Image: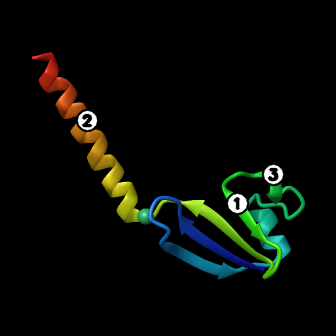
Amino acid sequence: MKLTYICERCGAIIGAMNITEAEMKMLGLDPLTVDMRQDIIKSTDTEELFIYSLCDDCVDTMSLHEREWTYRGNLKLH
Ligand SMILES: [Zn+2]
């Protein structure tokens, strides 16, 4: 089964790999319960799994924004 990690913010493909069902279970991805997880999309056509995550760029951008907001908040207080 092919596993593809996609950034939920910008849609970039973070990585892809082929794994077996046994390997899936090791990752905590049971093929029987995977449908219930909201961050995973299962493509029935291609037997491919898409897992939503964040790419490094978006993680950086988000932490920058957080710092900016904290900074602005402090400015308002003084
Ligand atoms: Zn991204």
Residue neighbourhood size for the residue with mark 3, other residues' Cα within 10 Å, grouped as few (<14), some (14–19), many (≥20): few
> Label 1 to label 2, Cα distance in Å?
30 Å
Residue 61 drawn above or below residue 21: above
Tell me the tag on residue 12. Answer: none
Residue at image coords 77%, 61%: 29
SS label for mark 3: helix
Tell me the tag on residue 40. Answer: 1
Residue neighbourhood size for the residue with mark 1, other residues' Cα within 10 Å, grouped as few (<14), some (14–19), many (≥20): some
Residue at image coords 48%, 59%: 54
Residue neighbourhood size for the residue with mark 2, other residues' Cα within 10 Å, grouped as few (<14), some (14–19), many (≥20): few
Which residue is more in the foreground, 39 or 31? 39
Tell me the tag on residue 69. Answer: 2
- Classify residue 52 as left or right of residue 2: left
Tell me the tag on residue 36. Answer: 3
SS label for mark 2: helix
Quadrant in the picture for residue 16: bottom right
> Label 3 to label 2, Cα distance in Å?
34 Å
